[in-house]
Amino acid sequence: MKAEEDKRTKASKCFKDTRYWALYFAMAIIVASAYAISSLATYSSSTNYQLKPTIPGTSPVWDVGFIPNIYLNVENTVHYQLNSSAAQVEWAALVPPNGGIVYVGRNREPFLPSVFHQLRCLDILRQAYVLDAHNTLPKHARLAAQSRHCLNYLRQMIMCRANLRLEPVVDPFGVHAVNPWGKLTCSDWRVVYKAFSKNEVDYTEWSESHSP
């Protein structure tokens, strides 16, 4: 009889221990989940003045406001050619005069928006192509190094976005194997340029107010 009671006592104690551990484990999960949700909420509410991201490995947020969609007709153009004085001006005009750098955070630290980096890289590849056609690229070591960087950088940016727009195959073995022409839905890039101009003015005013 006593042995039976001892078994029941041990079983009851074991059940209580298991229940307590389960309770502690559940509480730990709840606390961890609450912390994770709090961290994500803090990150998602990042503004133009929050520089240090909550989640490691991410960049600060440059809030330019709402960016509407616009339509772009994909087609060939007489502009943005390879090698002419007009082409140099047109390609250079795609990137703001200071290289497209914006200043964010309380200390106005400099960052380069990816869109300006990509446009700059296209112009670098254009220049490298022209120099290579004249067998003079080896004399420009800096541009050659930049072009290697840009080729890989643009590859990663394209793969990251993975645009799934379907383009009809015209001639798999022709010069123009695919027909990319047509209407394309895009983000209105004019909003970005306008936000850049505002950021430039704000940074100038901030610099003047913080000058010694």
Image (cartoon, rainbow, N blue to C red):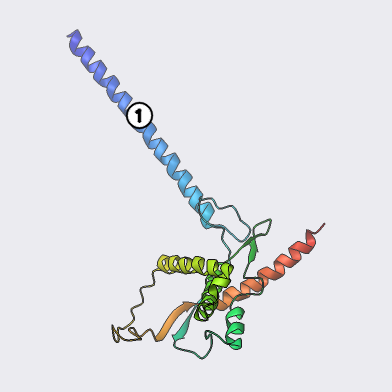
Quadrant where the C terminus sits is: bottom right
Quarter where residue 91 is shown: bottom right
Q: Residue at x 53, y 88 (%)?
A: 79
Above or below for 41 versus 92: above
Neighbour class for label 1 at 10 Å: few (<14), some, many (≥20)?
A: few
Q: Nearer the viewer, residue 35 or 164?
A: 164
Mark 1 secondary-structure assignment: helix
Q: Residue at x 63, y 75 (%)?
A: 96
Q: Residue at x 28, y 22 (%)?
A: 14
Quarter where residue 170 is shown: bottom left
Question: How many numbered markers are drawn?
Answer: 1
Which residue corresponds to mark 1?
21
Side of 108 where 165 appears, left or right: left
Asked whether residue 181 appears in the rendered view, the answer is: yes
Q: Residue 148: image x %, image y %? A: 49, 67
Quadrant where the N terminus sits is: top left
Q: Nearer the viewer, residue 70 or 99?
A: 99
Above or below for 130 versus 41: below
